[in-house]
Image (cartoon, rainbow, N blue to C red):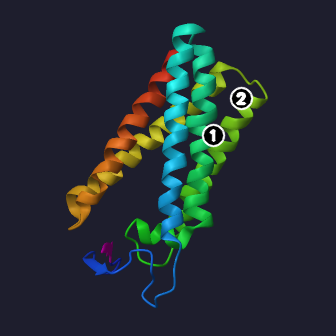
Amino acid sequence: MGATIHSDTGSPAHTADAGASPAGADTGTGVVEMLIWPRNLLAIAGVFLGFWFLSADGAAEAVRWVCLLAVGGVGVVAYVSHVIFARADAQRLGFGDKPSGFQYEVGFFNLAVAVMAILAVVLSWGATAQAALCLVYGTYFLQCAGLFLHRVRSEDAGRRFVKNVVIFLILSGFLLFFGVAALV
């Protein structure tokens, strides 16, 4: 049994399948849930390679991999989730079946930062540009953690967002760490 949050009342509504719309049509929530895995794997790979190269080749090589995978890769997958599968993502986040303009803005921001991160690496813009993109995305994730913390504290079913708070805080910390490390 899945739980969604009514956007008009803020109260949980239990359905037999969280991926089904009220009319019973599949909204693709399962696809959006599955996109969380590549997003997390790209972030983990970027951070792992960042620490690997930090100890071997220094901060400039480390931030290159973090920028490419944990910013570029994660941003592309986040865009796909928020924009391409907007309806299912809205439902997954508890906003009902209608995606909002805000959701598209978040997706477009993710894509913009991702494209710049990928270009910064592919076109060899250097560690300073790559570090700046890590700092931008890290700051954004810190704010996302704050938003989800607010949802945890203010919504009836907010406890389901605790893992989001933890994930965003951890990834934010890593991105900020590598961004600063490459600049000093």
Give the camera-side residue of 58 and 176.
58
Residue 22 sits inside the magenta stretch: no
How crowded pointer 1 is (Cα within 10 Å; few <14, some 14-19, many 20+) is rated as many
Give the camera-side residue of 126 and 2.
2
Q: CA distance from mark 1 to mark 2?
A: 9 Å
Q: Is residue 183 visible to us here? A: no
Residue 47 horizontal/vertical position (percent): 50, 28
Residue 2 sits inside the magenta stretch: yes
Circle on res. 121: 2
Residue 35 horizontal/vertical position (percent): 53, 55
User: What count of labels does the image hold?
Assistant: 2
Quick one: SS at disc 2?
helix
Question: Does residue 17 appear left or right of residue 63 in this picture?
Answer: left
Q: Quadrant of residue 17?
A: bottom left
Q: Is residue 29 above or below residue 75?
A: below
- Residue drawn at 56 percent across, 44 percent down: 74
N-terminal-most mark, 1 or 2: 1
Name the residue at the bottom extreme: 23
How crowded pointer 2 is (Cα within 10 Å; few <14, some 14-19, many 20+) is rated as many
Give the camera-side residue of 115 and 183.
115
Residue 20 horizontal/vertical position (percent): 45, 80
Circle on res. 37: none
Quick one: SS at disc 1?
helix
For the residues bearing labels 1 and 2, Cβ distance under 8 angstroms: yes
Question: Does residue 22 appear left or right of residue 106 in this picture?
Answer: left
Q: Is residue 130 above or below residue 72?
A: above
Q: Amino acid at mark 2?
A: Val
Residue 132 horizontal/vertical position (percent): 58, 28
- Residue drawn at 64 percent across, 19 percent down: 127
Magenta region: which residues? 1-5
Q: Quadrant of residue 63?
A: top right
Residue indicated by mark 1: 72
